[in-house]
Image: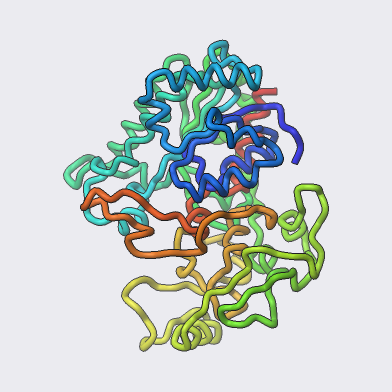
Amino acid sequence: MKKNKHKFVDLFAGCGGLSLGLEKAGFHPIFVNELNKDAMESYLKNRDDIEPRLRLPEFHINDVKKLVTTKGRIKKLINDIKKEYKIDCQKGELDLVVGGPPCQGFSGIGHRRSYSVDKEQQPSNHLFQDMAWVVSKLRPKIFLFENVKGLLSAKWTPSGEKGEIFEDVLDAFRSIKGYRVEYALVRAKDYGAPQNRPRVLVVGVRDDIDISPWNKLTSGVAKGFLPAPTGGAPDLVDLLGDLVDSTIINGGSTLTYPAPAANKHQKALRTNRDGTVAKKGSLVTEHDYSSHSPKVLEKFNFMHGNNGVIPKHLKTKKFAQRLLPARWGEAGPTITATSLPDDYVHFAQPRILSVREWARLQGFPDWYEFAGSRTTGGIRRAGNPREGNFDRELPKYTQIGNAVPVFLSEKVGQHFIKVLE
């Protein structure tokens, strides 16, 4: 990966989807915040070659609250950035701050699994205020806040007003002096991602930054603060077809590529950091299969033979699994990768997707590694806010499902660079 000159700070970074897209566009990370230790390790291990300084205590932090509430910590960060990277935040030299605070309390899926507590009781739902404060101190040229569609209609309490949380989010960012702020609801599929995945993006641009390049973009989104849709979402057979292994064993693994790259999408995802493209027979990681019970296999095989229909005797109350289509059709991608891979059945085989396939849905290349356990469940994944337990395990599937699609963030990063350059 090339050395990029535009520097950015990533808050609530997760396993690094937003960062990776920005890096591909031409940005370089200099500070990262992520609370979960496995997600943080996923982030760091994939950047040891381009920015090993992120492992230093000066340039990463787990809890953003420590950056906000510890006396002198933000001042130290500003001084460390100036000393190590020759970027003076007080003179407005930092290019970008991005952040996607945890959104379980705002999303329909996340809140369904978060028990019946008011959203204002969940600490993670107030992290946008911490991000706004950090932005006010670092004074970047541009900032980007990212979250789920549900934020637009979310209420603090059942008796509250629809959309009141988002109004508070906008107020927090618009109260930062010296920034113009716009927002839009975008869909990842419109920017080349093989998912629908609607996301709310709030962009702030400092008053002294010339936005005339954006003003000329009449087709831009959010008054030109965000890029116009590009399309180009691949069909699943074109995205994942080279990973289909005819020798598959239930609960087994595929250790090498069973086929060569057959198109530009597969070639891009198989391109290593040194520019080489993985060939048939080369090692492939994270392509392990779940061990499905005979009943589950019966259900998946029936779905394959009956256009995705689940037989009555095998239906469950928990959720309705969907058979993924090999090709989307005219409507384009209709799915959103969540933290649960069990929601979807592979288009060609009676199984759920592997971690590697799940990662490709988000645009992570095959060289990208993930730390932690493969999957988990129950309290370990959901926590229990009613008992004050807000801790969540983040297995690999969940880290990936929580990520911003690399396809989307790369397009946004390219758009930002048009102004910065």
Q: Check the image and report above or below for 188 versus 2.
A: below
Measuring from the top left, give residue 286's x and y in whole percent.
Answer: 62, 64
Quadrant of residue 69 within the rendered picture: top left
Measuring from the top left, give residue 418's x and y in whole percent.
Answer: 68, 28
Q: Residue at x 57, y 42 (%)?
A: 18
Q: Check the image and report above or below for 24 versus 299.
A: above
Q: How many marks?
A: 0
Measuring from the top left, give residue 20's x and y in whole percent.
Answer: 63, 43
Q: Is residue 310 left or right of residue 187?
A: left
- Residue 201 appears in view: no
Q: Residue at x 27, y 55 (%)?
A: 384
Q: Check the image and report above or below for 253 versus 8.
A: below
Q: Give the quadrant of the C terminus.
A: top right
Q: Is residue 250 left or right of residue 120?
A: right
Q: Give the quadrant of the N terminus.
A: top right
The residue lying toward the viewer, choosing from 333 and 204, is 204
Measuring from the top left, give residue 372's x and y in whole percent.
Answer: 52, 57
Q: Residue at x 42, y 46 (%)?
A: 148
- Residue 408 appears in view: yes
Q: Residue at x 36, y 29 (%)?
A: 129
